Amino acid sequence: MSDNSEQIELLREIAKWSRFMGFKQVKEVLESQLTDEKKTLAYYLSDGKNTSTVIAKTTGINQPKVTELWKEWASMGLGESISVSGGSRFKRSFDPKMFGFSLPEIKQKSLESKENTDFTLEETSHEQ
């Protein structure tokens, strides 16, 4: 095994154990922040591609509150602000589904506007 491949294997092992050690702490922080289905969905949709306006329309949370949540989540290490043309967006670091959170079903449909995607909630009941 070459030095380079040994280093890569060691880094993979370190990453695996880091994920394992941090799982409980991340879950606790997510549970403290994603206290209802709307916030959970807003966090899930915050993939760096969706605008705060799209997330607001989808979740029913007003747009200024979405940007406020983004700042709060970024300060807690739940994601980061990324630059996009015309400003910035939040990109989450974790998938809430991996931590046991349920999400409402969403339908995707194309818009004939500047934003390529819009989401609408399906009326379903899910538990967290």
Image (spheres, rainbow, N blue to C red):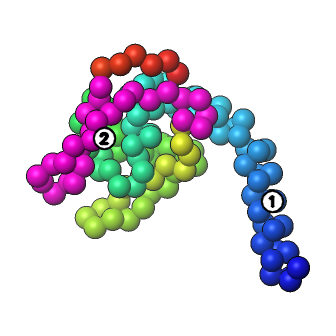
Asked if residue 112 lies in the magenta stretch, the reply is yes
Give the number of the mark in front: 2 or 1.
1
Give the amino acid at mark 1.
Ile
* Viewer-proximal residue among 68 and 29: 29
Q: Position of residue 76 (x, y in %)?
A: 57, 45
| 79 to the left or right of 13 | left
Q: Residue furthest front?
A: 1
- Disc 1 secondary structure class: helix
Residue 61 position, x and y percent, is 30, 31
Q: Which quadrant would residue 67 be assigned to in this image?
A: top left
Q: Residues within 10 Å of mark 2 (few under 14, many from 20)?
A: many
Q: Residue at x 30, y 62 (%)?
A: 87
Residue 87 lies in the magenta-colored region = no
Percent position of residue 27, x then y: 64, 34
In the rendered image, the vertical position of residue 103 relative to residue 10, given as above or below: above
- Please provide percent x and percent y for residue 113: 12, 54
Secondary element type, mark 2: helix
> Of 91 and 122, which appears nearest the observer?
122
Q: Is residue 6 above or below residue 78?
A: below
Give the magenta range. 97-122
Q: Is residue 69 left or right of residue 27?
A: left
Q: Separation of disc 2 and disc 1 at Cα?
A: 35 Å
In this figure, which residue is indicated by the disc labeled 1? 14
Q: Is residue 58 visible?
A: no
Q: Residue at x 49, y 55 (%)?
A: 80
Quarter residue 126 falls in: top left
**Residue 121 can be seen, yes or no:** yes
The residue located at (40%, 16%) in the rendering is 125
**Residue type at numbered disc 2:** Ile
Residue holding disc 2: 55
Of labels 2 and 1, earlier in sequence is: 1
Quadrant showing the N terminus: bottom right
